[in-house]
Every structure is written in C-alpha cells, then in structure tokens.
Amino acid sequence: MAGTLFIISAPSGSGKSTLVSQLRTLVEGLDFSISYTTRAPRGSEEDGREYHFTTRAEFERMIAAGDFLEWAEVFGNYYGTAFSALAHAKKAGKDLLLDIDVQGAAQVMKKLSEAVSIFVMPPSPQILEMRLRHRTVAEEAASKAAVPEAVIQQRLAEARHELKQMQNYKYALVNDVLEQAVTELRAIVLCERGVRDGVQAVASSCRTDAPSPKLKAALATFER
Ligand code: ADP
Ligand code: 5GP
C-alpha cells in the first residue's frame, strides 16, 4: 500500500478507543479501518461507522471467500479486517489505522512486516479494573442489561494474557495521563512519517526494544 499501516492493540478497558478518537482529531491523512464483526451494535454505534455489523453466516462466507487480511474470535464474536479497507486507503493516498486484537495483529505482522505496531498498556491491574467497571456502567446504560461480574473477570484475565504479546510490538505506551498518552501516540505516527522535530525523542521513548522506566514499572505491577 502507498501509505503506512498502523496497528494498535490493547487489553479491553485500557483506553484505546479514547486515545484513537483523540488521535484522529490531531492527525490528518489517517484513515480508520472499519472492521467486520458479528457482535451486536452497542449504544449509539451505527452500521458502517464503527463497524460493519454482520451475521456469523455472512462472516464465515467472507472467510471462505478470502476477503480478510486477518480475522479472529474475540470474546465469542468474530472480528475481521477486509482487504477492501486497505485498498480504499491506498486509493485515497492515506495511512491506515487498524484497531485490532493481539491475535489479528500477529497475523498482520506476519503478512505485512512493514506495518507499524503499537501496544497500549494500562498503568496497573487496579486501574484497568476501575476503567473496565466505569465503562461497564456506560455499557449497561446503553444496553439496559447488566454486564455479569464474570465478564469483567474474564476481561482482566485476558489482559494479563495479552500483555505477554507486548514485546512483539514496535512501540508500547502507558495510558496513564491521557494527554501524555495522546502526545506519545501522535509522536509515533508523525515520526514514522519521517517527521523528526519535536517528536523523535518522544517516539523513541516508546520503543519496546529499549523499554522506558515507566513501561517497566507498569509491567511490574502486572507481575505481582
Ligand atoms: P478500550 O477502548 O481500550 O476498551 P475505552 O477507551 O473505552 O477503552 O476506555 C475505558 C474507560 O477508561 C472509559 O471510561 C474511558 O473514559 C477511561 N479512560 C481512558 N483513558 C483514560 C485515562 N488516561 N485516564 C483515565 N480514564 C481513562
Ligand atoms: P469491541 O467489541 O470492544 O469494539 O472490540 C473488542 C476487541 O476486538 C478489541 O480488542 C478490538 O481491538 C478488537 N477488534 C476490533 N476489530 C477487529 C478486527 O477487525 N480484527 C481483530 N482481530 N480484532 C478486532
């Protein structure tokens, strides 16, 4: 593809959606890939805006037809990136951001080694749990149904599993203070575009091959 492909992954509740929506207001020329999913729309989500909502039968037909760059089953639902999202960004001459889970990211990294991968870390398991519970209140208000405690516990357990993949990403940032995490994310995107002034040092501080004290400290909280 003409532009750069960015992959962003994070354990559920880390604040990735919040970060991505802020990034999109700050950086031009970045398309957001709209994934296909078999999960039901939440809250104000619209078909064709947040996701292409589809049935399991249609998703399985697309798998068989080879329509996906990558796909995975996440929390019991299918999610996938169609090749058409890449074609669309290429035609528009834009970079493309894929917000996908660790399984899908591994598939893309294998197929497209030039893709730039970014992992978003929660600062600690305690803060992750607080954010998950906070977001759950919003989910419950939107769906008018209680999110079972087991779902929160499953998301926390899954987070520990996903963190083990962080080392496979080129960059990792800790979403502690939101403004700082947004600054880091923007710096990574601009640095990968070849901008140096004012962003190179910030982007370098997020490299996983030379983990910063902040990243090491966040990781250590999950080892306790
Ligand atoms: P994800 O997309 O990773 O599942 P969200 O973006 O939905 O996570 O964020 C989960 C919750 O955490 C939301 O209530 C959001 O407002 C909050 N949040 C996100 N980033 C921060 C931050 N840096 N500090 C405090 N709260 C945050
Ligand atoms: P949510 O249902 O909360 O929107 O997303 C759940 C998880 O699915 C998130 O980790 C998100 O990054 C991931 N996801 C969203 N779209 C895709 C996709 O196209 N492929 C893969 N592999 N994961 C996705």
Image: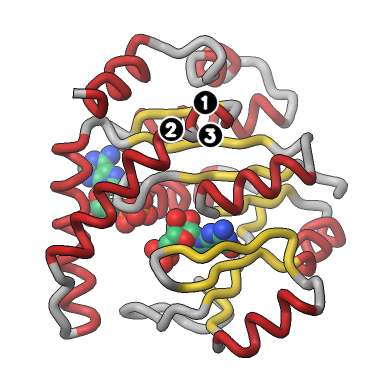
Q: Which mark is residue 67?
A: none
Q: Which kind of residue does numbered mark 3 sit on?
A: Arg
Which x, y percent locates residue 188? 58, 29
The answer to whether residue 197 is left or right of residue 5 is left
Q: Residues within 10 Å of mark 3 (few under 14, many from 20)?
A: many
Mark 1: secondary structure: helix
Residue shown at 48% from the left, 36% from the top: 119
Which image quadrant for residue 150?
Answer: bottom left
Which image quadrant for residue 213?
Answer: top left
The residue carrying mark 2 is 164
- Name the one closer to the observer, 112 or 31: 112
The answer to whether residue 62 is left or right of residue 21 is right
Residue shown at 63% from the left, 15% from the top: 197
Alpha carbons under labels 1 and 2: distance apart: 7 Å
Q: Which kind of residue does numbered mark 1 sit on?
A: Gln
Which image quadrant for residue 196?
Answer: top right
The answer to whether residue 135 is left or right of residue 115 is left
User: Which of pointers 3 and 1 indicates the residue nearer the eye?
Assistant: 1
Q: Which kind of residue does numbered mark 2 sit on?
A: Lys
Residue shown at 42% from the left, 71% from the top: 76
Q: Evaluate if marks 1 and 2 touch, with contact meaning CB atoms under 8 Å apart.
A: yes
Q: In the rendered structure, which disc, 2 or 3, sits on the residue that comes first in sequence?
A: 2
Q: Which mark is residue 186?
A: 3
Mark 3: secondary structure: helix
Q: Residues within 10 Å of mark 1 (few under 14, many from 20)?
A: some
